[in-house]
Each structure stands twice: as structure tokens, then as C-alpha cells.
Image (cartoon, rainbow, N blue to C red):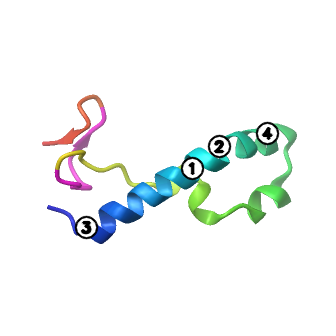
Amino acid sequence: MAKKSKIAKAKKQMAMIEKYADKRQELKAAGDRTALAKLPRDSNPNRLRLRDQTEGRPRGYMRKFGMSR
């Protein structure tokens, strides 16, 4: 079982990713790297660690099922 703070942090990051997704896509298409750098760091999907839906376990995650092994 993961710590509740880690699960809460992942939820907060997911909300931020969804919030800035459209803006990030537009800036990428325009090639505006300086504006991309000014966006919040956690709005980048690469920083999100996918977690098990039931326990919040970060390792052994299988995307197809949304669970860990």
C-alpha cells in the first residue's frame, strides 16, 4: 500500500496535466520552447508515475488492467 500523500500527489499532478494539455499541445506545435518552459513543471506528463488504482503501488503497473501484479 502506497502512502496516502503519494496517492494525493499523483491525483494533483493528473489534474494539472489535464488542465494544461491543450495549451501544451498548441505551444509544441508552434515550437515555442520558452513558453513551454514557463508552464508548471508538473504539467508535463513525463513526470507522472502511473499507479495501481486499488493500492497506489507504483511498480509492476500493467496499463491494460490499471493494476499492479
Using the numbered discs, state the Cα–Cα distance from disc 1 to disc 2 in whole angstroms. 6 Å
Position of the C terminus by quadrant: top left
Kindly identify the residue that appears in the image at 66 percent across and 49 percent down. Answer: 20
Q: Would you say the magenta stretch is mainly helix, strand or loop? A: loop
Q: Position of residue 60 (x, y in %)?
A: 20, 48
Using the numbered discs, state the Cα–Cα distance from disc 3 to disc 1 in whole angstroms. 20 Å
Kindly identify the residue that appears in the image at 84 percent across and 60 percent down. Answer: 34
Q: In the displayed structure, would residue 66 be above or below residue 12?
A: above
In the image, the segment drawn in magenta is 55-63
The reply to whether dot 1 and dot 2 touch (C-beta < 8 Å) is yes
The reply to whether dot 4 and dot 2 touch (C-beta < 8 Å) is no
* Disc 3 crowd, CA 10 A, few/some/many (<14, 14-19, 20+): few
Using the numbered discs, state the Cα–Cα distance from disc 4 to disc 1 in whole angstroms. 14 Å
- Residue of label 1: 17
Q: Amino acid at mark 3?
A: Lys
Badge nearest the viewer, 2 or 3? 3
